[in-house]
Image (spheres, grey):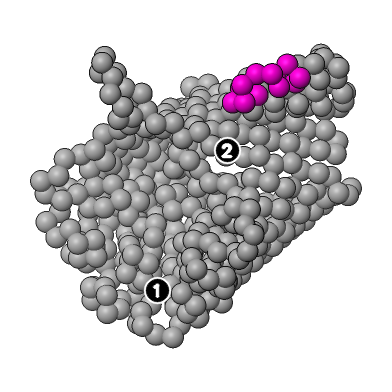
Amino acid sequence: MIGTNKCLRIILVQGKLKSTRRTKYFFTFLIVCFASKSGSAQFSVDAQYRNRFELRDGYKKLAAEGTSPAVFISQRTRISFGFESENLKFRFTPQDVRVWGDEQLSSSTGVFGDYASLDLFEAFVQIKTGEKSWLSVGRQQLVYDNQRILAARNWNQNGIAYDAVVYKWNSEDWEVHAGGSWNSTGENATDNLYDPKRIKSLNFVWANHRFLENWELSLSHVASGVTKSETENKLYFRQTSGIYSNYKKDGLTILGNLYYQFGKNNTGQNVSAWLADADISYKAGKITPGVGVSYLSGNKNTTGETDHLFDVLYGCRHRFFGGIDYFSNFASHTQKGGLADYYFYIDYELGPKTSLKNTGHYFALAQTNENTPSDKKLGYENDIVLKHKFSDWGVLESGYSFFLPTTSLKTIQNVIDAKFSQFLYVQLTVTPVLFKN
């Protein structure tokens, strides 16, 4: 065990090193010092390596005749330092995301590196403020319910985290969180100007109650604020209130969401929109079939006084709206018409560590307007995902998706001469625990 005095000597030595090296090692030694002073404290180091091969031949947009598939490999690398004691929790997670060979610098050998995107994924503390409450401050993930509105957004290699303050209160049957954030471009002397495409202020309240061992219910409200423009301080807040329910018993699972949005959109227009979805599945031995529907309201008239297009805010897209990712920005991808998704799936356990899941989606516009085709039908998507957990710390996953579009989708995407659209990926995820004390 490292003593406090030895820690101080090590930090002083680090101070004589170059600035980049000093920054790199300071947090590690600081946490070890804290851990060594408390017999009930725990210090851990976790890692995550995720490597993904992708073949895109119509991913995110229909493939046009004459185009060639794109093939590349991306990589995520994370290392997390965690410290927990009776009254304090701390987590620090730097990450690097890159695409193999994306560096353009010349090399006499012809072997190129890649542009690193080293950044800070997480850095927050949780301080105990009462017998049942904690205060979490810093860069952290906000993940609630089935991730319809606030999600990890884990499909993209960068992930998503928020700079926020969150108060957390827990009891035997209740869990209540309340959080807020305020984002700025820097340490400004005047004004609060910000890019209107980014969150200026995110505030939320979430309450979850477990009525029975197999039934939970959540109520939530999110106030998402954006500036009117990059040169104005005025804020517009979109308000989202909703309910989530999850029931599980004897292999049967039923879950659903219902959200209503009001307030103002990013242009100052009044908002009145809603989302509803329901999912039911039943596990019978090794097979779990399920069906569901998801409906996001849209506009019949885009020039009206009220915006009826529902914004899923910071929720998952890839998880809910198909693996080929045609529907993530609903203002442009549906021409503000909204979306209806009718789907079914079959999840089959090939073995204790291997599963195969097939999901079929039938997509349609929720509404037609002056910018959309008159026919609501958009097409059928099929997703197949094979997962094999070869170790406690490793998962190998492969997926294949294809889309059969209608003329309406071709018109919306402006790809009239479309060929067969498909997407293939193979992903390796390794999450070892490097150290735990």
Instruction: Point out residue 203 in the picture as x, y percentages from the top left corner.
Output: 65, 62
Instruction: Point out residue 153 in the picture as x, y percentages from the top left corner.
Output: 50, 47
Q: Nearer the viewer, mark 1 or mark 2?
A: 2
Q: Residue at x 27, y 79 (%)?
A: 370
Decide which of 420, 212 is in the foreground and name it.
420
Locate residue 432 relative to residue 336 in the image: left or right: right
Residue 290 visible in the current orientation: no
Q: Residue at x 60, y 64 (%)?
A: 192
Locate the N terminus by quadrant: top right
Dominant secondary structure of the magenta stretch? helix
Residue 16 visible in the current orientation: yes
Q: Residue furthest bottom?
A: 305
The magenta span reads: 11-22
Decide which of tag 1 and tag 2 comes sooner along the chain. 2
Q: Quickly name the residue at label 1.
A: 298
Decide which of 299, 246 is in the foreground and name it.
299
Vertical relation: 150 (above or below) 78: below
Indicate the amino acid at tag 1.
Answer: Gly
Q: Residue at x 32, y 55 (%)?
A: 326
Locate the C terminus by quadrant: top right
- Residues at circles 1 and 2 in contact by the CB criterion of under 8 Å: no
**Which label sits on residue 120?**
2
Instruction: Point out residue 316 in the picture as x, y percentages from the top left corner.
Output: 48, 52
Instruction: Point out residue 264 in the picture as x, y percentages from the top left corner.
Output: 53, 76
Residue 303 counted in the magenta span: no
Indicate the amino acid at tag 2.
Answer: Leu
Vertical relation: 354 (above or below) 201: above
